[in-house]
Image: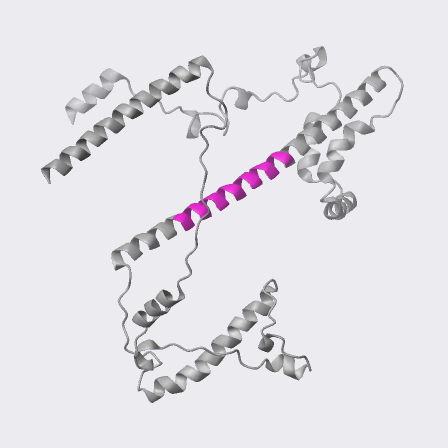
Amino acid sequence: MELVEEDELLSEESEDENSEMSDSALQDAFAKGLLKPGMNVLVEKPKQFANNVDAMKQCLADLKKDLPWVERLDLTNPPVEDVLAKMGGKKESESNGEVNANDDFQREMYFYRQAQATVLEALPLLKKNCIATKRPDDYFAEMAKSDQHMQKIRKKLLSKQAIMERSEKAKKLREQRKFGKKVQVEVIQRRQKEKKAMMTAVKKYQKGMTDKLDFLDGDERERNAPAKGASQKSKKTLNKKGPSAKRKYKDQKFGFGGKKSGKKWNTKESHNDVSSFRAKVANAKGPKGKKGKGGKQNKRPGKSVRRKMKARS
């Protein structure tokens, strides 16, 4: 045994030396130009497929076990009859195995009808073997996930919903602001346009190109336009009754326009006119004066007198 191991070690060392020698020899040959293309080509051998039918049957026999149907619960059924196709007078192409795999509807209907056939055959077998097919009312299943985990998921969903609601609300507010800003811009543009038109009309009037001042009444007309129908009745009633007493007094006091400065100045005639002078009123002897009855004035005693009066009491 020891000799065999020594021979193996010596053979490995000799192979290493040969490999080293071969590498150096290859380098020398490459340097001299002795190597030609196609000398070191890997040739793949054709793969051999083994179809051992007997071994496969033996494996299948080992896996196959003779168990009752209750333990296996396997069924192989053809699909049920297509009632709709039968009523429409069409032939069932699926029964002959002619199912178009590219037709999604036909393929799914085939699976559906096959499941129906399986249920129709399985339910009697399950009842025969006393296997319940309906869940009882007091059935409680163990959840795959804990209640804490589901609560976390619920909180996360609620937070996402709140975020979506806030974003929708902010979006609506932005739209409202945009609409308000748009209306504001339109109002400013309209005012600028009206101002420009008024300035043009004023310049025309100043240059003598027109003698109409209708542009000055434009703002009043616009302001009074909504209440035009309501104000016409009041104007008619005022014209019938005439101006009010307050209006008459103000007209009498201030006049109807024109020059008002210097209206109350004294003139030579008004200065010499003393017909309206009243001595009692001027000397405060009448009822409008500051004296009491009998013409005597109620004077307050002096400070020293008040002190004496206070000391006596």
Q: Is residue 300 visible?
A: no
- Residue 114, compared with residue 43, is above or below; it is below
Q: Residue furthest top?
A: 268
User: Is 245 covered by the magenta stretch?
Assistant: no
Q: Nearer the viewer, residue 267 or 251?
A: 251
At x 76%, y 42%, the residue is: 242
Quadrant holding the C terminus = top left
At x 44%, y 49%, the residue is: 47
* Magenta span: chief secondary structure: helix
Q: Quadrant of residue 243?
A: top right
- Count of numbered badges drawn on the protein: 0
At x 28%, y 59%, the residue is: 145
- Residue 67, compared with residue 275, is above or below; it is below
Question: Where residue 37 sits in the image (x, y, percent)?
Answer: 50, 25
Start and end of the magenta stretch?
Answer: 160-182
Q: Nearer the viewer, residue 308 or 173?
A: 173
Q: Is residue 141 visible?
A: yes
Could you tell whether 100 is left or right of 269 in the image? left
Q: Nearer the viewer, residue 6 or 165?
A: 6
User: Is 162 covered by the magenta stretch?
Assistant: yes
At x 71%, y 10%, the residue is: 268
Q: Residue furthest bottom?
A: 128
Q: Quadrant of residue 260?
A: top right
Question: Where residue 43 sits in the image (x, y, percent)?
Answer: 46, 38
Question: Where residue 161 sits in the image (x, y, percent)?
Answer: 42, 50
Quadrant holding the N terminus = top left
Could you tell whether 90 is left or right of 31 in the image? right
